[in-house]
Image (cartoon, rainbow, N blue to C red):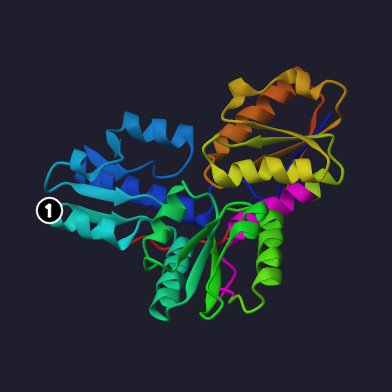
Amino acid sequence: MEIHLANIQGFCAGVSRAIQIVKSLLEKYGNPLYVRHHIVHNTAVIEGFEKQGVIFVDDLNDVPEGQRIVFSAHGVSQSVYDEAKSRGLIPIDATCPLVTKVHKEAKRFSEQNIQTVLIGHRKHQEIIGTAGYVKQGLLFYIEKSEDVKGLVLDTTKQCGYLTQTTLSVTEAEKIITKLKEKYPKMIDPAKEDICFATQNRQDAVIELAKFCDVIIVCGSPTSSNSNRLKETAALNNVNSYIIDNVNELNLEWLVEKHKIGISSGASVPAIIVDNVVRKISEVYPNTKIFQEESMEKDIIFDIPKI
């Protein structure tokens, strides 16, 4: 048995930044600390913070006046900031800088009266936040390539697109190609929106799929980027499974398999991958483990002054 770990593991820079912001606030001010929505989409991270006194809320009305409220890595609209301030709360921004970049592009498009097509999962917190920066009447959604057929834009006006940062690169390219076939003058964002961490992890799975018999993706079912990793493996004709923790690992998946690929989402603690490797090694004692140094090890986003 061989275990081949994807060459990128652990938190991406945006997730690491958001988690460090919450940790720093707990150290300086103690609990309770309020966070709007889950700070990142990972069960272990959320449960760990809840044990330390972090309270996750969906509605700002659930936060007492004068308390700090952290906005998750997925970002929020300007109206949410304004509401927090009007209620006497102290907003702390943990939005991933790459998501903030998309917000700025959305705002720029609206200022130029450009019809804006948001490509992504309409109910995902990131897309909800980005939509808040687009003027009414200029906003359109595309979730899958089939949706392009029903999209109706005003051809007398400019149009452009933005994407959720955690999409499948392959699926996003399909959608963009169809969009441009239908609307040839479609404007690209200033820079590609799918974040480097998402793309790097998908590329790593593609590499694993070239020689692995099965791929295990460590990630929570609510994590968009983790689900895209599973889909990437499937698109490359390799059986893949997504697990939230080592207890969900079904050893029957490994029967008669010789090369096991293991990947993880951008919000997955390294300990979860370590536990999976440990369990497989216990069942198959002569397992060889292969891992390269992470190409993201030196990428760090600064955190705001707490």
State the residue position of label 1. Answer: 88
Which of the pair 207/74 is nearer the observer? 74
Secondary structure, mark 1, is loop
Amino acid type for the residue under numbered disc 1: Gly
Q: How many marks?
A: 1
Which quadrant of the figure contains the C terminus?
bottom left
Which of the pair 248/141 is nearer the observer? 141
Quadrant assignment, res 93: bottom left
Which quadrant of the figure contains the N terminus?
top right
Q: Could you tell whether 6 is left or right of 76 in the image?
A: right
Quadrant assignment, res 84: bottom left
| Mark 1 closeness class: few <14, some 14–19, many ≥20 residues within 10 Å | some
Residue ID at (21%, 49%): 68
Q: Could you tell whether 175 is left or right of 160 in the image?
A: right
Residue 276 drawn at (x, y percent): 65, 28
| Highlighted range, magenta | 188-206
Is residue 194 shown in magenta? yes
| Residue 296 seen in the current view | no
Residue 143 drawn at (x, y percent): 58, 52
| Residue 252 seen in the current view | yes
Residue 51 drawn at (x, y percent): 33, 29
Q: Could you tell whether 199 is left or right of 138 in the image?
A: right
Residue ID at (33%, 32%): 50
Is residue 136 shown in magenta? no
Q: Does 70 appear above or below 239?
A: below
Residue ID at (70%, 50%): 7
Which of the pair 114/292 is nearer the observer? 114
